[in-house]
Each structure stands twice: as C-alpha cells, then as structure tokens.
Amino acid sequence: GRDRIALGGLSNTVTVCGNENGQRAVYLTDRYGFNNPGTEWDKENIAGVLIGDSFTAGSEVQDDENIASWLRQLTGYSFINLGVSGSSLLTSLATLKEYATTLRPKAIFWLYFEGNDLAELNTERLNPFLLRYLDANFTNNLINYQTDIDQAILEKLAEHSHGNRAKETTKTN
C-alpha cells in the first residue's frame, strides 16, 4: 500500500470551528472532507477552485459565507473550496494536485496569507511526503481513497481520545 495523508477532513461530517463572530462556524464537509455543498463536485463546468488555509476554508464563518460560497452566489458559477485550516504552500500544492486536476477548472485562486504561510512552510518543508509533490508527475490518487482516509482519521481521533482519557484517569487517581 502507498502512504496516504489526509489533506481534507473527514468526509460528510458536521464540522464545528471557531467562534470569531460570536457564533460557532458549522458546516457539513463534502465527500472529500472540504467545505462545499456535496453537489458541487457533480457539476460539469467548474469555474474555479480555491486553495489556501483557514481563510479559504471558511473556518470562522458559516458555510454560506466562505469565499467560494460568495463567488457561487455572486456569479452563479460553480466553485470548489479546497481550503484547509493550518495548511501552507506545500499542503496546498498537494491538495491542488490530488483534487483539482480531475475537475479541470477554468481558474485556480490560490489564496496566500503573509501572516503565517511562510513560517508554516518551514515546518512543511521537513515533511518528506509533502516534498514528493514538488515532482511534477507525483500524485497519490487520494481522490479515489476517501474511505481509507476517513478510516485513518477516525483511528487517529480514537487514539487521541484514548490518550486524553488515560491522562484524565491518571490525574484523578
């Protein structure tokens, strides 16, 4: 088996994010774990794909208020949001190669945040898996392995949850 990394989140899952505007941002992830209406992937003519970090993903706003959603509302065209909270340039490149190439969008909007993207790139450049995406021909075909990705995310969450319960038990004893 190939090594796989989760670039999006858990698919078809209610996601609760930050509370920057006095109300928790809540959205249902699409079939690949991104913040899009599920039907958006079925459209034939994708006007654009948005790539970037939490600002692109819409982590602090309601699902109809993220940038891709606004573009859909204002233009009537189809836009796919591939934003991922905490991602930087290498993760964005990987996400673009894994998910956008099959869509053949007319445009790609790569949103860059000067406040932290370069600092996060320093961490990402140490990840040998992400560095493989600098090879023009490399892809891990992640779009076809969402079931495996979801399972890996659920296992990680269970490990983390179990680890936290063990710590809590140790503290109370």
Image (cartoon, grey):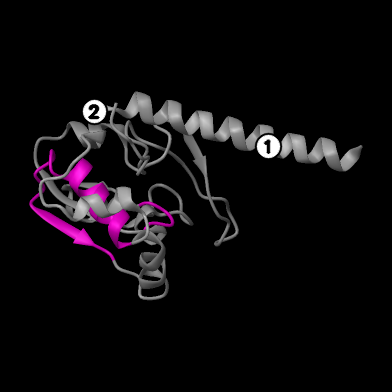
Residue 100 image position (x, y, % from top left): 18, 45
Question: Tag 1: residue type?
Answer: Gly
Residue 57 image position (x, y, % from top left): 37, 53
Q: Residues within 10 Å of mark 2 (few under 14, many from 20)?
A: few
The CA distance from mark 2 to mark 1 is 31 Å
Q: In the figure, 28 relative to 109: above or below?
A: above
Question: Splitting the image into 4 quarters, where does residue 19 fall?
Answer: bottom right
- Magenta residue span: 84-111
Residue 74 painted magenta: no
Say which of marks 2 and 1 sits in front: 1
Q: Which residue, given by chain and number where applicable, does mark 2 sit on?
A: 144
Q: Residues within 10 Å of mark 1 (few under 14, many from 20)?
A: few
Disc nearer the start of the sequence (2/1): 2
Q: In the figure, 146 relative to 167: above or below?
A: above
Residue 35 versus residue 64: which sits nearer the camera? Answer: 35
Image quarter in which the C terminus is found: top right
Q: In the figure, 157 relative to 51: above or below?
A: above
Q: Secondary structure at mark 2?
A: helix
Question: Tag 2: residue type?
Answer: Asn
Q: Identify the disc placed on residue 150.
A: none
Q: In the figure, 125 relative to 145: above or below?
A: below
Residue found 36% across the figure and 54% down from its top: 127
Residue found 37% across the figure and 40% down from its top: 6
Is residue 55 visible to the viewer in this orientation of the structure? yes
Q: Is residue 126 left or right of residue 68?
A: right
Residue 22 versus residue 136: which sits nearer the camera? Answer: 136
Q: Which residue, given by chain and number where applicable, does mark 1 sit on?
A: 163
